Amino acid sequence: MRLRVAIVGAGPAAFYAADALLSAEGATCEVDMFERLPAPFGLVRYGVAPDHQKIKTVTRAFEKTAAHSCFRYFGNVEVGRHVTLAELRTHYHAVLFATGAQSDRRLNIPGEDLARSRPATEFVAWYNGHPDYSHLQFDLRQEAVAVVGAGNVALDVARILCLSPGELKASDMAPYAVEALSHSKVRDVYLLGRRGPAQAAFTSPEVKELGELADADIVVRRDEAELDAISAAELGCSGDRMVEKKVGLIKGYAERVPAGKKRRLHLRFLVSPTEILDDGSGAAGGIVLTSNTLVRTENGSISPQPTGETETIPAGLVFRSVGYRGMEVPGVPFDERWGVIRNDHGRVTDPATNAAVPGLYTAGWIKRGPSGVIGTNKPDAVETVMALLEDAPELTDNRDLPPRAAILEVLTNNDGCRPVSFEEWRRIDEAECAAGAATGRPRVKLCSVAEMLGVLG
């Protein structure tokens, strides 16, 4: 059986899906991957913290997938602009969407839309050199910054704000971001979690890093580091070693005496923002917090409940990091509430009938929501591919596709479309790495599509 599949997106889920298809037994799969930007790897390139170089080595596995003779990469091609979904369905037996979750969830509190109140997604994309965000500016003259959220992304943002110039230059952060952050006036960074240390979504390796920052003391209140009775009982029953380690690290930080470093990173727990305050100029100047206590809900979960006590902390810059959400793909059923493509174990479903839409599939964050780590996308993608392969006889039955080369004609006949192959991406990659080697950095990113295409001549 010969099966031709288009994958839209080029992040981890997309490459894991491609690998599962290309290594499938009993089927010869041809896989074409379409990515809006010239550079592949999605979240790994534009989401993983620039000082986390070890995590980024996962791209070596993706490069092996890309080297398969039945794989083609079409970078700098936007589905819906350069090629339509209808055209993809004409040229492929199946189309698999792995477009990630690019937008953010809101706090829905007064003052959220003030100047200097921004989504963390923008800041992360900016310092990682995403072409859509490289033009943004952030007012780093502010001495106090609040980061609302307690996940790994929130922790990344807080840590990046506290890095020394030397730590910044050891990363693959965008050059303009290294320059801006090296001259930052930020002195206090507040990470705000609405539940306790045991429920915080960030993990112990990320927490451990905070205690090793060259220019920042970590500050934790003893009363917020201590577990409440409900959390202590649950942890005692679960015996979760990773949570125990995380809680232990946080308790240890609460006992630390500040060393008088340049910056202070405050880890706060059991607080929820209720309002972002105007400094009088239409911009954020502070944030009102309400204290929480944890209660057991009817469904058994642990939930924060306001105590009525409030406090105000300074914050001339506020980043919300309370979750990512996917963006609708035109022509593909979308669940607005959950921010994902409607699907049943990877099969896209019709909202009117709940039946599977023949030939449409999804994987990754756009399938299940923003959860897990990079590796979590592998079993997720495999589940989708297994469903696709199960459907393959019906997808291929009595259906002759145009020649495989025909999709190139569709793209090249579209004015303004300049596809970038994986071999060409390697040339861009080599140029970035060479520039990095010349300056003692892992790479110097090219942060615009024009710069990337300029390498190709």
Image (cartoon, helix red, strand yellow):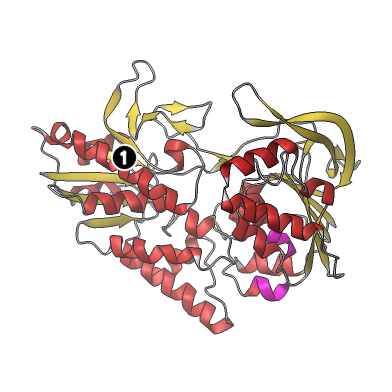
Q: Give the residues drawn in magenta, as a range.
A: 158-168
Q: Nearer the viewer, residue 132 or 333?
A: 333
Identify the image quadrant of residue 195: top right
Viewed as shown, does residue 47 lie left or right of 281?
Answer: left
Position of the C terminus, as image quadrant, is bottom left
Badge 1 is on which residue?
Answer: 384
User: Considering only vertical position in the picture, is 215 above or below 14?
Assistant: below
Magenta-drawn stretch contains 165 = yes
Which residue is at 73% across, 55% downward?
Answer: 250
Which residue is at 52% across, 66% downward?
Answer: 446
Identify the image quadrant of residue 235: top right
User: Considering only vertical position in the picture, is 298 above or below 63?
Assistant: above
Which residue is at 46% across, 44% downward?
Answer: 100
Q: Nearer the viewer, residue 338 or 117?
A: 338
- Percent across and percent down for residue 259 are 85, 70
Magenta-drawn stretch contains 58 = no
Q: Residue furthest right?
A: 280
Residue 189 visible? The answer is yes
Q: Residue furthest top?
A: 352
Position of the N terminus, as image quadrant, is top left
- The amino acid sitting under disc 1 is Thr
User: Considering only vertical position in the picture, is 350 above or below 97?
Assistant: above
Identify the image quadrant of residue 283: top right
Residue 315 visible? The answer is no
